[in-house]
Image (tube, rainbow, N blue to C red):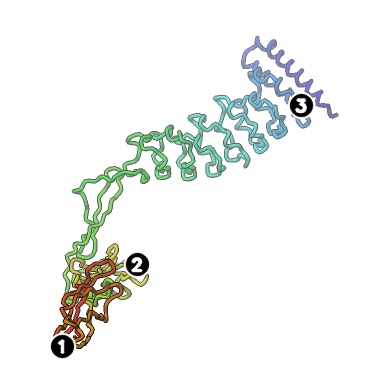
């Protein structure tokens, strides 16, 4: 017949008290071994008398249970596989369970998935708690890995049993004692960049295993002062740590020598980081050019450019040297698909009449480009110091000044001279004008030229620009009859 829960509660408490008293008074006088044997039989009889299937787990007064009074309590006889772990009340005193006395090796049928791990008092476990006996590989998906006191594990803890490869994203990696990790520990899975600021100050630098992969650490976040001297392997130095390479100058090893047109290469080893340093040896530049301008050693094309001569009559505007550049004698031609960089060349200007060199230069020394505008100048031996420059010649502006003509009767002059101060200039630039002085004119019978004895050409600001013109005169006549 099924009994009520109160019956079990009362009965269990009464039985517990009776057996405790009996054990105390009756067995104290007997031999220890015999007493323990009798006590086990007593507990066995007690456990067999309980209807476990109908045991009131949820209503049992667990707090009142005298956990600490059972010195020889046979925990191995408790039907752990029948306990409804998932039905335990919220106030179940997990911290009173003598975890270290449980028969872990015989709990093959324990329903680990049903244990309410979120209520498990990880931080209250005794010092001798058998951490190594937990079925770490069989933990449920919702196991609270973050609650395990990883930094308090015993020295003999078997880290090989922990399924590190299956840890959740929020696993507390910073609590692991890295100096105790197994050989197959997934160092590359650890979010090193997310470690707290003080993590590296307490990092076990000097106790890490020999196979520790130093390269996985976020060295850009680690101050070199935190790492003790002699810790890093001889063949490793954090590439993120800024430093100036130091090496023995005499120990540069030639990898391949430079030629006249191609660079060489040599190597050394940094005394700090042990990194192999490779540097380029500039080409010697000592080409041997044939008559065609091509180096007989390396095939480099020689380039010497020259600008054209440009002439212009003065028109008030500067004379710009823009022109097609030519290849001077001794040059080779360009390779297929290469062009002179006219977009980057700047020519000289001449703003007065006379002569000036037609200098030119290239922005950033980009002289030759390919069809896409890429600089290919290094593929040529460009001899800037031998560039040839044409001349910019600004010739004076030709100008014809024509004076006017006039005539008069002698009697009408009344003793004065006949004059005409009119003139024209056919090619005078706008805003320029001429100031002229004429001779004395014609005062007697006869004819003479209407000459200008002095003139000057000025611009709108009054500046003398006479020298910029080549002037000829066509004088009119003055006739007195």
Residue 56 or residue 194, whichever sits in front: 194
Residue 43 or residue 450, whichever sits in front: 450
Instruction: Evaluate whether residue 215 shows in this view.
Output: yes
Residue 21 position by quadrant: top right
Q: Position of residue 115 (x, y in %)?
A: 66, 35
Which residue is the site of mark 3? 59
Numbered circle sitting on residue 447: 1
Which residue is the site of mark 2? 374
Instruction: Evaluate whether residue 306 shows in this view.
Output: no
Q: Quadrant of the C terminus?
A: bottom left
Do the numbered discs 2 and 3 sit on residues whose CB atoms are within 8 Å?
no
Mark 1 burial class by Cα count in 10 Å: few <14, some 14-19, many 20+: some
Q: Secondary structure at mark 3?
A: loop
Mark 2 burial class by Cα count in 10 Å: few <14, some 14-19, many 20+: few
Residue 156 position (above or below residue 165): above
Q: Position of residue 20 (x, y in %)?
A: 70, 15
Give whichever of discs 2 and 1 has the lower sequence position: 2
Distance from Cα at disc 3 to Cα at disc 1: 153 Å
Distance from Cα at disc 2 to Cα at disc 3: 86 Å
Residue 214 position by quadrant: top left
Give whichever of discs 2 and 3 has the lower sequence position: 3
């Amino acid at each position: 017949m099924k009994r009520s829960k109160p019956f079990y509660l009362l009965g269990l408490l009464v039985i517990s008290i009776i057996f405790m008293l009996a054990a105390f008074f009756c067995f104290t006088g007997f031999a220890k071994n015999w007493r323990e044997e009798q006590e086990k039989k007593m507990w066995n009889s007690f456990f067999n008398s309980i209807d476990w299937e109908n045991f009131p787990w949820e209503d049992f007064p667990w707090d009142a249970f005298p956990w600490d009074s059972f010195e020889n309590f046979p925990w191995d006889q408790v039907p752990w596989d029948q306990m409804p772990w998932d039905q335990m009340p919220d106030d179940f005193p997990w911290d009173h369970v003598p975890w270290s006395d449980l028969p872990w090796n015989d709990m093959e049928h324990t329903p680990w998935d049903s244990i309410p791990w979120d209520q498990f008092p990880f931080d209250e476990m005794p010092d001798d708690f058998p951490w190594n006996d937990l079925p770490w590989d069989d933990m449920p998906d919702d196991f609270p890995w973050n609650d395990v006191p990883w930094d308090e594990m015993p020295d003999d803890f078997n880290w090989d049993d922990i399924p590190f490869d299956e840890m959740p994203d929020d696993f507390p990696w910073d609590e692991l004692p890295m100096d105790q990790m197994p050989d197959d520990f997934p160092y590359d899975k650890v979010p090193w960049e997310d470690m707290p600021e003080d993590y590296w100050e307490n990092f076990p630098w000097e106790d890490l295993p020999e196979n520790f992969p130093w390269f996985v650490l976020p060295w850009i976040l680690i101050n070199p002062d935190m790492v003790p001297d002699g810790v890093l392997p001889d063949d490793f130095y954090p590439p993120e740590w800024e430093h100036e390479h130091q090496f023995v100058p005499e120990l540069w090893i030639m990898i391949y020598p430079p030629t006249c047109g191609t660079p060489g290469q040599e190597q050394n080893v940094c005394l700090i980081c042990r990194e192999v340093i490779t540097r380029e040896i500039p080409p010697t530049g000592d080409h041997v050019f044939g008559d065609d301008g091509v180096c007989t050693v390396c095939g480099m094309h020689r380039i010497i450019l020259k600008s054209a001569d440009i002439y212009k009559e003065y028109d008030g505007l500067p004379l710009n040297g823009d022109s097609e550049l030519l290849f001077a004698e001794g040059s080779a031609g360009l390779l297929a698909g290469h062009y002179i960089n006219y977009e980057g060349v700047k020519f000289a200007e001449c703003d007065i009449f006379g002569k000036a060199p037609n200098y030119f230069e290239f922005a950033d020394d980009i002289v030759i480009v390919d069809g896409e505008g890429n600089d290919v100048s290094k593929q040529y031996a460009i001899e800037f110091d031998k560039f040839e420059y044409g001349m910019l010649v600004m010739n004076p502006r030709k100008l014809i000044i024509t004076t006017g003509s006039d005539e008069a009767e002698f009697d009408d002059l009344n003793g004065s001279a006949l004059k005409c101060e009119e003139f024209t200039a056919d090619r005078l630039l706008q805003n320029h004008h001429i100031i002229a002085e004429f001779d004395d004119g014609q005062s007697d019978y006869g004819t003479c030229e209407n000459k200008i004895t002095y003139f000057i050409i000025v611009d709108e600001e009054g500046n003398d620009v006479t020298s910029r013109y080549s002037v000829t005169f066509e004088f009119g006549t003055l006739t007195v009859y």
